[in-house]
Amino acid sequence: MTESEKLIEQAECDLLHTYNRYQIVMEKGDGVYLYDHEGKKYLDFVAGIAVFALGYNNKEYNDALKSQIDKILHTSNYYYNVPAINAAHKLKAVSGMDRVFFTNSGAEALEGAIKTARKYAFLKDHSTDHEIIAMNHSFHGRTVGALSITGNPHYREAFEVTSKGVRFADFNNFDSVLACVNDKTCAIVLEPVQGEGGLNVADKMFLENLRGLCDEKDILLIFDEVQCGMGRCGEMYAWQKYGVKPDVLTSAKALGCGVPVGAFMMTEKVAQNSLVAGDHGTTYGGNPFATAAVEKVLDLFESNHIIEHVREIAPYFEEKLNAFVDKYDFIIERRGTGLMQGLKLDRPVADIINKALSKGLVLINAGSDILRFVPPLIITKENVDEMIAILTECFDEI
Ligand SMILES: *Cc1c(COP(=O)(O)O)cnc(C)c1O
């Protein structure tokens, strides 16, 4: 038995079994490479699911965290702290939003967004039976509120009761949204690019129509950019690519590049007409350690020209994936945008992912039949070529 096998056996005795994990114990990372407990090296095109935008073991980032550890890790939100103040100010500047609330995760950011929308509507008519329109195939997280707007019945089934007051429309189908709207609608929530749901990219016209509808009826438009935000689509936030600004914006995953942190943000108008002191809180959210990470991440995005790099590398990556679609009959299409890409196959992708892992390439699925690519944003053309070469071997063996 290898050391890893022993560890995995132990893990399966102690951890609640809510994941079917790959049989690997990850140990450390460097740049775009991961190393497992046995010392095997992997090229990583998952980045901890769109988290490690700057790659692993970035020295400046690590140093910033180490120096914050030596100052203070946590203070209550009843006091101010410098990293949170700086991080909020910088996040406002790059997101175009006016007010920031830091959370511990993406799901928690969605919880805050839902509460914001419900409070906004409550203040208008003092009723509590408002409805939210969400999209089929959406993913917003696993807490009960976030789950209630997640358009995947499989995730919700046993917890369906929480989806009271939520209607599901079809992504990119404005008529289906119109069919859900009524006087009780308080918000429309969607990912401009659906991640878990299959790398579905919103049409500009769809988002423009939603914006128009929300303006007309004073409904809040919420964009969940937990996965597609933070430069992944070639702008800091995907809304900027479309020129369609939401009222409420959620962010997480790459926001802390490894430190658990998220945020929900809003315009000044929404802030002035929704949550007030006492309405919302969190013990850890926005603590100095997490926000020191956010501040450094935002600095490094700027100094390392991450957005420009994504714009440069993404077309090259797309071109290579398109060539796969032409070459292999079992690949139906390429989906996605920027460094958030998918290949839809005519079969389950689990075997291919396992094959890739054995050859030292980390990939992940989106649904059962889509290979998802959400690499560190710092990948080079050489990294793309290396990935394509390994994946070619995997495809050739099918
Ligand atoms: C991952 C994800 C979430 C949930 O984030 P957690 O940090 O896992 O709670 C929410 N929305 C989208 C779009 C996501 O991709």
Image: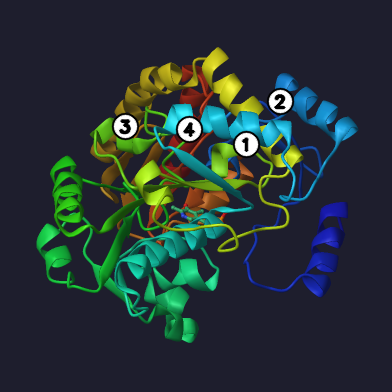
- Say which mark, if any, is on residue 92: 4
Q: CA distance from mark 2 to mark 4?
A: 21 Å
Helix or strand or loop: what does disc 3 sit on?
helix
Residue 312, how many percent across, how many down?
A: 38, 17
Q: Residue at horizontal 90%, vertical 31%?
A: 70
**Which is closer to the viewer, label 3 or label 2?**
3
* In contact (CB < 8 Å): disc 1 and disc 2: yes
**Looking at this view, is 1 or 26 the one in front?**
26
Q: Is residue 267 visible?
A: no
- Mark 3, residue position: 240
Residue 309, how many percent across, how many down?
A: 44, 18
123 in relation to 194, above or below: below
**Looking at this view, is 368 or 355 the one in front?**
368
Q: Residue at horizontal 48%, vertical 32%?
A: 92
Helix or strand or loop: what does disc 2 sit on?
helix
Q: Under 8 Å from ligand 1: the CB of mark 4? A: no
Q: Under 8 Å from ligand 1: the CB of mark 1? A: no
* In contact (CB < 8 Å): disc 3 and disc 2: no
- Mark 2, residue position: 61
Q: CA distance from mark 1 to mark 4?
A: 18 Å
Residue type beneath disc 3: Gln
Tell me which numbered mark, 3 or 2, is placed earlier along the sequence: 2
385 in relation to 353, above or below: above
Helix or strand or loop: what does disc 1 sit on?
loop
